[in-house]
Amino acid sequence: MKKYVGIDVGGTEIKFALLDEKAQFLEKGLIDTPHTSLEDFVEAIGSIVDRFKPDVEAVVMSVPGRVDSKNGFMFTGGAIRYNYNVAMTGLISKRVDLPVVLENDAKCAALAELWMGSLKGIESGMVLTLGTGIGGGIVAHGKLLRGYNFAAGELSNLPTTIKPVNDPIQAWAQINGTGALTVPFAMRKGMDVKEVNGRRFFEAYHAGDEDAHAIMDEFAVNFANAIYSIQTVLDNQRVAIGGGISAQDVLIEKFNEKLNILFSNLHPFSPIKQPEVVRCTFGNDSNLIGALYHYLYE
């Protein structure tokens, strides 16, 4: 049985796992993400891989930012500022003496869902990971779409208007990132914004808090409008939602409710058709599974 070390780099933590070729998890763990230097980052990855050698075939990585997955080059690294313009796979491969591949985290999530999850068998679909920002992985003709600059699916930056005369342009992340739930709730309640996270918001929502319900309603309407805009370009069959808040059943229910209303009010001859919205299958494991798929099959 061949084994692989999966690495999922986040701004706060680096998740890792030992996987077999069928994406079965043999061991899991995590460490804090170094915020000191590129050298410390490479050594942190190396120390993880050292735990599992010599019985490892390769290192498969999911990373934030815009990356050239074919050549292992990171143009950007999200919040990890030392990971900008770095030939990353070469550095890590030299440290661990193994093949190393990497791919953008949201694209890894899409690959996992395409392989054996909620997008399996789907020709046109998309994964959206809702967090501080909005990660996207687009599937076209049954394959991951990367784009000319490897930036296809960077939907945090989708503008909220194309006519900003009386409506200033915002990025989609500002109105459908998790902050669009927690910040308005904190402000309505006179609370410190830092004291309100997604869990606290949904506790209030499920307790029947009127402010939480109003905020969720607006959040879902905004999401539906954005999906309509994306649908005019991609004509998706299915959209799979990931990220921590996707575990909330009410989120998927509300998204579909508002999409039903929006699409039912379209002109009957409109060519734009409503996509199915579902939850991602693999949750926090998707990035690791997708990174493995990238190595094995792409």
Image (cartoon, rainbow, N blue to C red):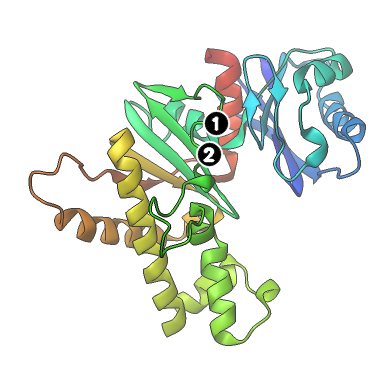
Residue 190 horizontal side relative to residue 154, left or right: right
In percent of the image, x 49 and y 31: which residue is there?
A: 152
On screen, 132 above or below 146? below
Looking at the image, which is closer to me, 178 or 109? 178
Q: Quadrant of residue 196?
A: bottom right
The answer to whether residue 14 shows anywhere in this view is yes
Give how far apart the Cα atoms at labels 1 and 2 are: 6 Å
Q: Quadrant of the N terminus?
A: top right
Furthest residue in direction bottom, as rendered: 190
Looking at the image, which is closer to me, 174 or 209? 174
Q: Are the residues flagged by discs 1 and 2 in contact, CB closer than 8 Å?
A: yes
In percent of the image, x 40 and y 43: which residue is there?
A: 240
The residue wearing badge 1 is: 151
Q: Which mark is residue 281?
A: none
Residue 180 x, y percent position in the rendering: 52, 65
Residue 89 horizontal side relative to residue 129, left or right: right
Residue 261 x, y percent position in the rendering: 21, 61
Residue 157 horizontal side relative to residue 236, left or right: right
Kind of residue sitting beneath label 1: Ala
In percent of the image, x 88 and y 19: which residue is there?
A: 95
Residue 77 x, y percent position in the rendering: 72, 36
Residue 163 x, y percent position in the rendering: 38, 54
Q: Quadrant of residue 113?
A: top left
The answer to whether residue 208 shows anywhere in this view is no
Label 1 secondary element? loop
On screen, 145 above or below 8? above
Label 2 secondary element? loop
The residue wearing badge 2 is: 154
In percent of the image, x 33 and y 34: which residue is there?
A: 234
